[in-house]
Image (cartoon, rainbow, N blue to C red):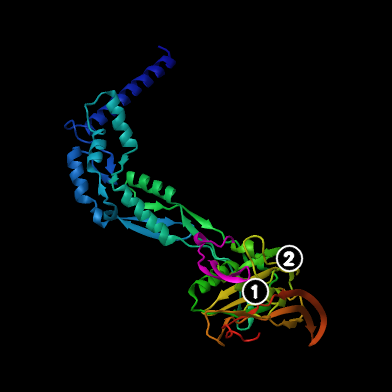
Amino acid sequence: MSLFKKTVLLSLFLLVQSAICVFGAAAFLETGYSGVIRHGVTVNGIPVGGLTPAQAARKLENTLPGPDKIKLRFTDAGTGKTAAIALPEINGKYDFPAATEEMTKYCKKGLDFSQLISVLRLRAAPAELALKITYDDEQLKQNIKLIGETWKEQPQNALVKISNQKVLVVPETNGYRLDFENTWKKTRLALARGVFNISASGQILQPEITVSDLKGIDTLLAEFTTAYDGSAENRAHNIALAGAAVNGSVLKPGEIFSLNRCLGPRLANTGYLKAPVITNNRLALDFGGGICQVATTLYNAALLADLEVIERFPHSQPVNYVPPGRDATISNDHLDLKFANNTAAPVYIAGRADAATFTVRIFGGDKNNRRTVRIESEKQLIAPKVIVMRDDTLQEGETRVINPGKAGYQVKVYREVLKEGRVVSKTLISEDYYRPTNKIIHVGPKPEGVEK
């Protein structure tokens, strides 16, 4: 016999012998009663090999911590936010029946070739089973929503303020919103695997105004304040609401500000209440009464900041919070207050309503080179007419003032720019006419026969 044939026969002999040894070893390892779980199977890290599924379930129940001691722990790695839900809060329990059914798949069923392969596979790579958790899905949803509410943060725009007589730019901060759907799905998958640490899904909310948007702002250009009756609750509410909408507005160089666009519709469903307004030369109640005081305050601040006023309308009658010629009114979309940022730096508008005053501050770059602005007026009073009417319901010689009347005005408003106390420019800003209201007096009838 040749050396080659001897080598082949020897190799086959050794291969067969090895197979017999492996089979024998496997058979030795798997001796025992049929129906027990094979060695190499664990549930939540606990070995259950050599036990029946029922015995394994009891072992798990006695070894694992009780559901009342377990918490689902949520973490958002990007923000460091953490939260926990105790398992009883979602009626969470170990699903031992499902675990028992799963462990049955790994029980001994004799030792044919396929079973031998399973034995060897378990020896090479032990099976790690998960003990699932049953729970109330609605309670899970409610608890995740509660985490979302707790974690929720609104983004904060960069802002400009005065501190210790200095203009400061306060940096923006990001906001956060939990992604409920994805976090809920992740939690369901984790509970199905018996896992209690969940990586929450969330979204970083970016602010609209950042420090870079305010670059170049270093000066308070103008400030103007008007007073109102704080006890008129609806009017005060509307002023505060409109002031909050104006607050934080930023105009880039060349950009135009529109108060109507900034405020949007003044309706009940946008939060405005009914308060007195001037319409058709008379007072009436309407939603948004009071916002004209916001318009007037903003208008005067824009004048003092030396911004370019593009559109402005006066009231039909003088108002009591600024001199005639210094007021501004808006109405829906056909009367607006508009002004442009005619500077080389951004302009920031801050509006604040206190108990009985509304203040507008306008910040920007020091475009005036330490110049100051002054508003001057030329006012001509127009006396009301006196109208006397007979009233037969009055006694002889009795008089009654029905309408006290109101003076009108012809007003010219100028903007003066001063440097080192000297006027360097004077510009006519507006010419307004406020129609007087007639004084009406009722008098009683004269006796019969008396000459008129």
- Tell me, yes or no, whether the highlighted magenta stretch contains residue 393: no
Residue drawn at (43%, 16%), measured in percent from left and top?
3
- Label number found at residue 253: 2
In the rendered image, the residue lying farthest to the front is: 449
Q: Left or right of 59: which side holds 22?
A: right
Foreground residue, 312 or 117? 312
Name the residue tied to disc 1. Answer: 296
Is 274 one of the magenta-colored residues? yes
> As rendered, which of 379 and 125 lies closer to the eye?
379
SS class, disc 1:
helix
Q: Is residue 220 visible?
A: no
* x 71%, y 63%: residue: 256
- Specify the segment rendered in magenta: 264-286
Identify the amino acid type marked 2: Pro
- Where is residue 101 drawn, in percent x and y? 24, 36
Residue 177, image x and y in percent?
47, 57
Residue found at the very far right of the displayed protein: 424
Name the element at disc 2.
loop
Q: Circle 2: is it few (<14), some (14-19), or many (20+) Cα within 10 Å?
A: some
Q: Amino acid at mark 1?
A: Thr
Does residue 27 appear anywhere in the picture? Answer: yes
